[in-house]
Image: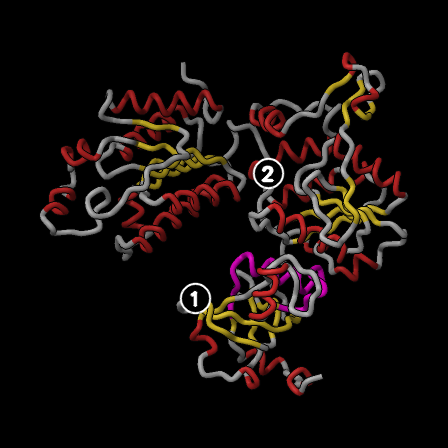
Amino acid sequence: MSERSERVIGDEALRGAPTWTPNPTELSDLELLLAGAYAPLGGFLGRDDLRSVAATSRLVDGRPWPLQVKLEVPAGMLDGIEVADAPPLVLTDAEGAPVARLDVAEVWPTREGWCGVAGPVTRYGDGGRAPFDRLRMPTDHVRAQLTAQRVLGYFADRPLHRPQLAQLNHAARQLNAQLVVLVPVGAPGPDGLTSESLVRCVLAARDRMNEPVIVAIPLASRGNEITDALIRARVAAAYGATHLLGTATTMSGGGPRVLIPRELVYDSRDGQWRDRDEVPERFERIALTDEEIAGLLDDGLPLPEWHTPPAVARELSKARPPRRQRGVVLFFTGFSGSGKSTVARGVADALLETGERSLTVLDGDVVRRELSAGLGFSKADRDLNIRRIGWVAAETARHGGMAICCPIAPYASARANARAMATAAGADFVLVHVATPIEVCEQRDRKGLYARARAGQITGMTGIDDPYEVPTDAELVLDTSEGTIDDAVDTVLVFLGEEGWINPRS
């Protein structure tokens, strides 16, 4: 054991140690490291291990490992500090509460203004708490509950309906295995289902399984199917799984043996789920698709009991209420002078007259004055302005309200971030591109901005010397140079009515 690893550092020293809040992916990795789910890793990887994993999917010592588990901090944080004498780095959650200490073993430059930090981590402080904290168990706590020789792991990344439960129970019986259900809570689930709602849905199906051990794990997708499949297998193995019920694309990567679930259909003769080739076609019902389930919930219709246990259906109906009752962000984007604020105001006025939705209007100019005072028009400031609008809108929609936003929002990434915040809040997001041509907007020039930009008096004018990234994901496109403002307002209201967010327009 090295001299450094033998040092004992008390709470007093830790209170004066540098602190850093990792990004969401790094925090997810940190929690999994602390839980033992990333065994054999005990901390963030160093430069050589990261290079080796990227090139060979193995650590330097030859052990297989599929994921680069890395941490970056601002370069200035550790300037002038020798690694041998470096104090521990205290890692905090998003609220600034300490989660862990990292004993710095290596520091190296990564990109401009940032450096990588490696070293073992140890739980410290009371941060990192979250809903269903009791289910975020370390691997040793879960393994202590396992009594069977075989353990079937299952990643419940979506609600468990009867066909999935039948597949799961059949596999467990065939193996004579104990069941460990791993619920990923590192990001929203399918169709914007919040992680808390997903856990509730899984718990609602608990009595349909044979004494399962249910574990919430902050595992987020890396956007690569192969990497995601391999790390899931390693995490399942760390929690004691000897077998893993997966899909045709699930890979073990040297971990648990992967079982491919049977294709089941509902047998209307006796209400059982059976192999498709065992049920005559006239008696079979196939499982509902995700789209069909979402459509029933959107329309406020009950999920059929032959397909979904009532307790799970109740949780899903709470998590995804009918669109008429669900929060929604109506986000207008377009050039200055395109008419987006006028159309948005007309939509808001019409809904205020009917009283059918609780409204918050976030006009670009008003937000600039009340919420984003002091921000300029650089890309960074514009992105921050849209982030603020998106956050307020998402919080409005989280509680069932409708937020109507009408900034210019010229950048696709900022609009996508606003959409993601609404989705994470369990709300819907409707992007309306007011695609009035720039020539028409410049002719209107109600604020005189285009004329000043052409004269060189101002810079950063969208459409003149700053780009507008045309949306490719808009749910609705309008052009106020064609028809009247009332026509555009009616188009939006008809769309909202047809899609179920408001009463249909007569």
Q: Residue at x 24, y 22 (%)?
A: 482
Q: Count the marks.
A: 2
> Which residue is the extreme one toward the front?
56
Indicate the secondary structure of the residue bearing disc 2: helix
Quadrant location of residue 26?
A: bottom right
Q: Residue at x 90, y 43 (%)?
A: 176
Dot 2 alpha-carbon crowd within 10 angstroms: few under 14, some 14 to 19, many 20 or more: few
Q: Residue at x 79, y 62 (%)?
A: 140
N-terminal of the two: label 1 or label 2? Answer: 1
The residue lying toward the viewer, choosing from 30 and 502, is 30
The stretch in magenta equals 20-43
Q: Which residue type does callout 1 highlight?
A: Arg
- In this rendering, the answer to whether 10 lies above or below 270 is below
Q: Position of residue 21 (x, y in %)?
A: 52, 65
Looking at the image, is mark 1 or mark 2 nearer the viewer? 1
In reply to whether residue 451 is colored magenta, the answer given is: no
> Which residue is the extreme one toward the bottom?
3
Indicate the secondary structure of the residue bearing disc 1: strand
Q: Can you identify the residue that label 2 sits on?
A: 190
Give the side of residue 378 with respect to residue 20, left or right.
Answer: left
In reply to whether residue 39 is colored magenta, the answer given is: yes
Q: Position of residue 441 (x, y in %)?
A: 19, 34
Q: Which mark is residue 262?
A: none
Dot 1 alpha-carbon crowd within 10 angstroms: few under 14, some 14 to 19, many 20 or more: few
Q: Which mark is residue 111?
A: 1
Give the side of residue 228 with respect to residue 372, left or right.
Answer: right
**Which coloring applies here?**
secondary structure
Which of the image's four quarters has the N terminus?
Answer: bottom right
